[in-house]
């Protein structure tokens, strides 16, 4: 049986057997060679160990390109005017305790961690919600100890604005929020829109414009590669043994492009499963855009109607 396979329509080839099986086969044919020798021979023929590469795009939403164009257009307008543009998302939940953290780190001896990642052994579960300021290349992460809800998401944005955003952007009339299409800040979430209305638009008298990235396109959300990526690299192979140590690792994240990160620990408990009735949704001062109206909308203040 041939030991190599491939696609006749391309130059893609692969080896069917392991190094040890190839070594035994060569020995049976009168060409003894150790597995390491077989490895070197394969590398000379441009073979190497590889994982599957996610390169083929699946089915795409017909409005995908229109949405990307709309987002870029709004970003350009806001940034040129000096108005705030933030990219938000919840990072993967993390078990807090003496558990293995993915990645490798330069050290003389590996840190000893639990041999199993049982949730029952964890101190708790961290919910990091990130805010990336595109205007200044600054990142902010609010580490929750409860549930990843829309209320937690908007609370994080409101806290950021009150303590950091407002001094950076005094007297700004509007805010642009870029976010994924699902999760606590998803386009289907009624609670997300209600919280934006009550906590931001009504309290601050600002126009809150929201643009959601299409399904399957979250990797294009700036926060993913400009904030969450560097954070994962910074804490690689470092066990997250406490909420405080996790927060410190996030805050110590930097990049050669000048990224600055601040992290805050949130102790408030959030309730999951809250429902928003139809009459409450109808009372929102929400204006949908003509382009992809489900993904793009502006929430106007009800407290300061002269700004609408």
Image (spheres, helix red, strand yellow):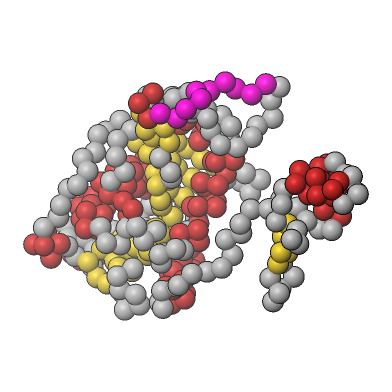
Foreground residue, 19 or 162?
A: 19
| Rendering coords of residue 54 (x, y %) | 57, 61
Q: Quadrant of residue 296?
A: bottom left
Q: Is residue 117 magenta?
A: yes
The answer to whether residue 34 is left or right of residue 198 is: right
Q: Residue at x 19, y 65 (%)?
A: 285
Above or below: residue 16 compared with residue 125: below
The answer to whether residue 245 is left or right of residue 189 is: right
- Range covered by the magenta-colored residues: 109-118
| Rendering coords of residue 116 (x, y %) | 47, 27
Q: Quadrant of residue 278?
A: bottom left
| Rendering coords of residue 232 (x, y %) | 55, 41
Foreground residue, 92 or 294?
A: 92
Predominant secondary structure, magenta span = loop
Q: Quadrant of the N terminus?
A: bottom right
Q: Is residue 38 magenta?
A: no
Foreground residue, 130 or 167?
A: 130
Q: Residue at x 27, y 49 (%)?
A: 150
| Rendering coords of residue 149 (x, y %) | 28, 46
Above or below: residue 173 compared with residue 149: below
The answer to whether residue 44 is left or right of residue 241 is: right
Residue 200 appears in the rendering: yes
Q: Residue at x 42, y 32 (%)?
A: 95
Foreground residue, 65 or 56?
A: 56
Q: Residue at x 31, y 51 (%)?
A: 184
Q: Find the residue positioned furthest to the left.
A: 279
């Amino acid at each position: 049986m041939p030991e190599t396979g491939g696609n006749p329509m391309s130059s893609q080839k692969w080896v069917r057997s392991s190094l040890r099986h190839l070594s035994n086969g060569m020995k049976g044919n009168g060409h003894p060679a150790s597995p390491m020798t077989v490895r070197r021979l394969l590398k000379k023929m441009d073979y190497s160990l590889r994982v599957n590469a996610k390169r083929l795009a699946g089915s795409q939403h017909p409005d995908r390109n229109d949405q990307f164009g709309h987002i870029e257009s709004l970003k350009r307008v806001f940034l040129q005017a000096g108005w705030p543009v933030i990219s938000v998302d919840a990072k993967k939940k993390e078990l807090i305790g003496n558990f293995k953290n993915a990645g490798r780190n330069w050290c003389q001896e590996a840190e000893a961690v639990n041999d199993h990642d049982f949730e029952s052994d964890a101190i708790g579960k961290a919910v990091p919600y990130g805010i990336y300021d595109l205007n200044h290349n600054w990142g902010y992460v609010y580490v929750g100890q409860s549930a990843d809800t829309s209320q937690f998401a908007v609370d994080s944005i409101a806290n950021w604005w009150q303590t950091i955003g407002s001094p950076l952007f005094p007297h700004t009339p509007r805010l642009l929020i870029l976010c994924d299409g699902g999760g606590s800040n998803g386009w289907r979430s009624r609670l997300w829109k209600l919280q934006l209305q009550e906590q931001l638009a009504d309290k601050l008298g600002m126009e809150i414009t929201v643009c959601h990235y299409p399904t399957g396109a979250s990797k294009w959300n700036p926060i993913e590669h400009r904030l969450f990526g560097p954070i994962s690299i910074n804490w690689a192979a470092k066990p997250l043994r406490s909420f405080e140590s996790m927060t410190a690792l996030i805050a110590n994240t930097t990049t050669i492009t000048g990224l600055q990160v601040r992290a805050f620990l949130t102790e408030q408990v959030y309730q999951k499963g809250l429902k928003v009735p139809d009459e409450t949704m109808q009372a929102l001062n929400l204006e949908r855009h003509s382009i992809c109206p489900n993904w793009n909308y502006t929430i106007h203040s009800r407290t300061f109607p002269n700004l609408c």
